[in-house]
Image: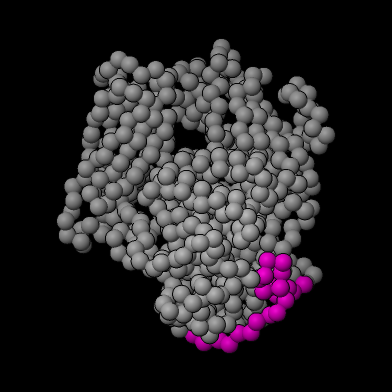
Amino acid sequence: MRDSTHPNPLHEREHWRDLCGTWQFAYDDARACLTPDDVTFDREILVPYPPESRRSGIHDEGFHPVVWYALDVPLDPADRQGRLLLHFGAVDYHATVWANGQLVARHEGGHTSFCADVTEAVRDAGSMRVVVRAEDDAADLSRPRGKQDWQLEPHSIWYPRTTGIWQPVWLERVPETRIDYLRWTPHMERWEIGVEVELRGPVGGNLTLRVRLEQGGNLVADDRYSVHWNEVSRRIALPDPGIDDFRNELLWSPNHPTLIDAVVELYDGDRLVDRVLSYTAIRSVDVQGNRFILNGRPYYLKMVLDQGYWPDSLMSATDEELRQDVLLTRQLGFNGARKHQKIENPRWLYWCDRLGLLVWEEMPSPYRFTSRSVDMLTREWTEAIRRDVSHPSIVAWVPFNESWGVPDLPTNAAHRDYVRALYHLTKTLDPTRPVIGNDGWEHVATDILTVHDYSDEPAMLLSRYGTLESTRRSVEHQRPGDRVLTLGGFTPTDQPVVLSEFGGIAFMPSTESGWGYSESEDEQDFLGDYSALLEAVYECMGLSGFCYTQLTDTFQEKNGLLYEDRTPKADLLKLARATQGRRTAREMTIDPAMNPFGYSLRWRKRQQPVMDSSEEQAELERGD
């Protein structure tokens, strides 16, 4: 398995250049600048970190609706061979891009990638001046925004904003006729891998497509197809190992994250036109009765809520930071992560693929229901699925969370129809994975019935989900967060039930302020409280899995298993044993204080934050 730092690891070419680094930067609060010539760049920023972050070098958390970027890129003669593409991982929210003064791209959507063909703009030029205008109105609650706060200071469950470029930017040289898009679809039942290839550019002559698959250095398949159209769709038959022991070694799972390297080449006769490196895997995902199924067998989900924020860089991160989060999640004993209200950098998905971590991918929500919000979310969600559908680690799609963006589900038929429409659209775009229409409650269409229940009494969880019968009663009558679990004629029948948010135990140093859904006083209490909740959940026979809240502290929310700097709050091995179901006992109480969403929150105010523990983090890194 290759190990590179390419920003798009499923579609990697040899000739690319990283453009991250120091760019020119300017604010345009009056929205007065219409073209690059109107802008006075008066400061610098470190891309891809947003200007609200410390790591960007700016660290301005105020309201700035329009920002501008500029970078001068030297070119060499090779850059003018074929086509030259300028890629953006994500720009929040409306992006307009110029190259050498020519408008080359517009994109709407703060979490998905896009690219600009700059070939004509740089023809015969020795350099390229890239200028980006990003517009992001913090007050627009119709826009998919996830956890980005619309108030000046982060409050309740929302965090600092992200404006402008926040994922990698890179330049790529490609041929005139090229492999534009790849999609891999495993079919374990027939021991086949589906491949769909979209070509860009003139198609003619004697074009053929070659697909080579290797696993562990051994050739698995070497197929060649004639190309007559701009799309090629084939199924590649693999040799069936037959015996389960051999099959299990070749199937992708968290315990055996076996990846298959792929080389896809386009030929014109004997001449190589284009080559893309990629990878895939053999695995299947399904639901049967009340069980989640992985590779044809019932599989218990042990997930953690991961919000993907870092104290110095907000939603942006280095490749090593993304890798460390996946490693720490595995070291804590989890087999999956629910990436919450964020479409994560593809490099994180790469590490989940490679290191073995199941992923629920969730669309960042808007907070108002309008015709415009429907259009924006649907378009961006479609782009996210297209971008990420080939990652074997993704095992579920989640278009909505807790009725955000559809606040009147119980009373408004249009809101219910919208959730049903997104559920069915997602199933249409990807029939191979379960879809959770609206995670947490008020289900109207879902393959997995998910529940958000922050009771901190183990006995209460056991009474609600301890047996199949009590779970059915809870689904019908329980109201976690003061919301019904199903509505609008939706009647669950033998669906898996997953406790997709619970826990949220706050533990923080005496010098720090923040909140959680319950609170532990010291490290021993924290470990005991966590262990007791997990012990109770494992005894709940009505559940097919869980997702604990949460992996790390996130600004004012202090209910992580790790501090913001990724230092564990208790012994890592003991936490992992609890995650895996080791038994301890601990009494808990319920705090009656409620936030507007019906959750039980316990606040504690202190004067100053805890200091980072870099030595402990270094020990974790050395021990991976």
Is 413 rendered above or below residue 299?
above
In which quadrant is the C terminus drawn?
A: bottom left
**In the image, residue 193 lies at what x, y percent?**
28, 44
Is 193 rendered above or below residue 301?
above
Q: Which quadrant of the figure has residue 23?
A: top right
Q: Nearer the viewer, residue 339 or 89?
A: 339
Left or right: residue 230 versus residue 132 is left
Residue located at (53% from left, 85% from top) = 459
Residue located at (64% from left, 71% from top) = 482
Magenta-drawn stretch, dominant element (helix, strand or loop) = loop
Residue located at (42% from left, 37% from top) = 11
Is 360 rendered above or below residue 70?
below
Q: Nearer the viewer, residue 43 or 270?
A: 270
Instruction: Verify whether residue 601 appears in magenta.
Output: yes
Q: Which residues are magenta?
A: 584-605
Residue located at (67% from left, 74% from top) = 600
